[in-house]
Amino acid sequence: MKKYQSVICIVAAVTLLGAAAFCGYHIYAHYAQVDEQEEVFDSLAEVVENTPAEEETPEDTPVSEGEDVLAKYQELYLQNEDMVGWIAIDGTAINYPVMQSKNNPNFYLKHSFEKEYSDLGVPYIQENCDILTSDNLIIYGHHIKGQKMFGALENYKDKSFYEEHKTIQFDTLTEQGEYEIIAVFKTVAYSVEGYRYYDFVDAENEEEFNAYIAKCKELALYDTGVTAEYGDKLITLSTCEYSAQNGRLVVVAKKIV
């Protein structure tokens, strides 16, 4: 009997060690991939930052259909035509391309700029948003530990951080843009208790636009003293927030330049 119990203990120990090793490997692989993808993003940012403003794509190179892509984004757009813009926030690690894949809405949730599998993904715009005409562009990004990707939005829970970083740079391929933050709030997704901010893309009228702004201000963690008027263009940044199940942290801003 004792011998039988010893065998069981040995088998259990080996099983636990195997499970621990398996989990450890996947944790290591995850963080290794995160570091690798961050290096890729750094190299993409270097391309943007080091491209002379006057640089032009050769005439025989198709860049877009009827659009004049800004010089600094031409090389990256030619690499991946799902790229629709670039987002950056001073004082954070947020300095990334923004994608959109209307026929495969959440593709960049788990894919890299090179369209390979990635735990980081790439910030991307909701599929029913029109990058040029929509009243509100909803941009999603993973909340990655260490202030990576949209994990850096956690800083905006602190009003003192907001006071020092009130604007967001969001460029389309054809136009540079600066946005002033209106509200930062928490909510939950997929629940009647939460606010479905992602449903607001195009306002049918002034009343609907004002209702969205009013709700964002009502839920806000603090008063920014900034509001928006019908006709303003908005971006809404969305990432996971872990104080509640299916929690979301949302940053809403209006275009000022």
Image: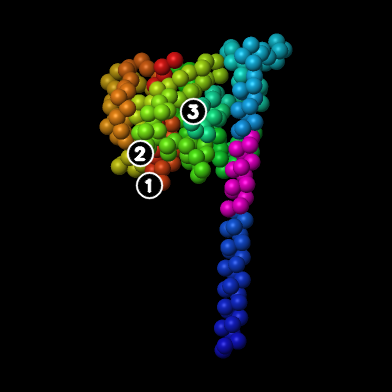
Of mark 3 and mark 2, the one earlier in the sequence is 3
Magenta segment:
27-40
Q: Secondary structure at mark 2?
A: strand
Type of the residue with mark 1 = Ser
* Badge nearest the viewer, 3 or 2: 3
Q: In the shown orientation, is residue 153 left or right of residue 226?
A: right
In the picture shown, does residue 94 fall above or below 60?
Answer: below
In the picture shown, does residue 142 fall above or below 129?
Answer: below
Q: Secondary structure at mark 3?
A: loop
Viewer-proximal residue, 199 or 257? 257
Of mark 3 and mark 1, the one earlier in the sequence is 3
Q: Which residue is mark 3?
A: 90
Q: Is residue 68 visible?
A: yes
Q: Which residue is mark 1?
A: 243
Magenta-span inclusion, residue 37 = yes
* Badge nearest the viewer, 3 or 1: 3
Q: In the shown orientation, is residue 61 left or right of residue 37?
A: right
**What is the quadrant of the N terminus in the image?**
bottom right
Q: Quadrant of residue 181?
A: top left
Where in the figure is residue 35, as x and y percent of width and height? 61, 42
Q: Which residue is mark 2?
A: 186
Where in the figure is residue 220, as x and y percent of width and height? 31, 33
Where in the figure is residue 204, as x and y percent of width and height? 33, 20
